[in-house]
Amino acid sequence: MDTKVERVFHHVGLGDLSLIRAYVRETAISQSATATAIDELILAVNEAIENIIRHGYQDNPGDITIYVTNHNDSVQVKLLDNSLNFDPTTNSSPDMTLPLAERPIGGMGVHMMRVFCDEVTYRRTDHGENELTLLKRIDLGDEN
Amino acid sequence: MLNVTENKVEGTVPVTVLRLTGELDASNYEALIVQTQALYVDGMQNLLLDLENLSFVSSSGLVALHNMALIMRGETLDDAQEGWRAFHAISQDLGKASGPEAHFKLLKPQPMVKKVLDTAGFTTIMNAFEDEATAVSSFS
């Protein structure tokens, strides 16, 4: 059975990152999830939150709503904020095959989201909110 | 939260060991850079970063490591957030130099931290050791 929890974090700043990671760790409970899978999901969520705070709210306090849905075979984390229109999925990941000197500046956070999540999707809601959804598929025994 | 302790050990040359405990993210990475810069100005020439008790590192933490590597080369960045320029500088130097950073090395990264370092390509430019004595003696 799917379970879904929701929490609004008010006036979020960088100092709240640890609290948010702990919240996701507590709620992203899937019976078949490995510790590695949860760690990877939390990293991706952290990167998304850092982007929202820095680029969306531009380091001003703002609210972020976090929905965590546990499915049998995946965990979904949805982030809602009402900051500037900011779609992180349009950022291209650095080409990791290029020598470091040739890589474009920035994009490491989005790259981490893409590497460690199976799906990263964005939309602007009808209420003018940024909605970023991260999906991590959980496979029993998928320790890598 | 991040706790940083410092001690000096003697190998072939003096080595400063910074031991990180906790999590390194956007809330605290700049302080680590500042601390490293201050130690460098104070005479630190070799830095071993002990990651054994670091349970989390974000992309901001990677920026810190980049800056620390540059500092240990005697280079600094005006803006601590220009992490990718640090990548370029390191890589360009690597074209002329011989391998990974000589004065900045890593110790015992936890599996998830190592995975992040590997994903960013850091472990090709920063040596990571599993044994402190071996790490310390690798500085020359």
Image (cartoon, coloured by chain):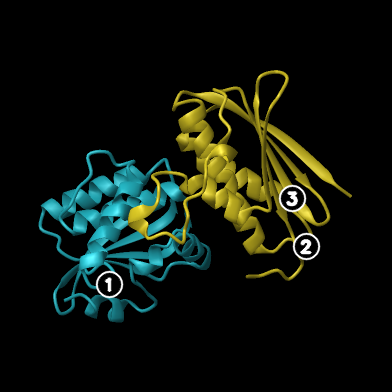
Q: Is residue A73 above or below residue A6?
A: below
Q: Pointer 3 indicates a residue of which chain?
A: A
Q: Which residue is mark 3?
A: A75
- In front: mark 1 or mark 2? 1
- Please tell me how crowded label 1 is: few (under 14), some (14-19), or many (20+) other residues with Cα within 10 Å: some
Task: From the viewer's perspective, tell me whether residue B41 is left or right of residue B125.
Answer: left
Image quarter of the C terminus of chain A: bottom right
Question: Residue A46 at what x, y percent from top left?
Answer: 55, 44
Circle on res. A32: 2
Tell me: residue B120, above or below residue B82.
Answer: below
- The image position of residue A142, as x and y in percent, is 70, 68
Alpha carbon separation for disc pair 1 and 2: 42 Å
Instruction: Describe the element under mark 1 as helix, strand or loop.
Output: loop
Residue B31 is left or right of residue B61, and the answer is left
Question: In the displayed structure, does residue A31 sit left or right of residue A45?
Answer: right
Determine whether the residue tagged by mark 2 lies in a helix, strand or loop.
loop
Q: Kindly identify which residue carries mark 1.
A: B99
Q: Amino acid at mark 1?
A: Gly
> In the depicted view, which residue is nearer to us: B59 or B29?
B59
Picture mark count: 3
Q: Is residue A17 visible in the rendered structure shown here? A: yes
Is residue A24 shown above or below B135? Answer: above
Question: What color is chain A drawn in?
Answer: yellow
* Rendered colour, chain B: cyan
Q: Residue at x 29, y 42 (%)?
A: B80
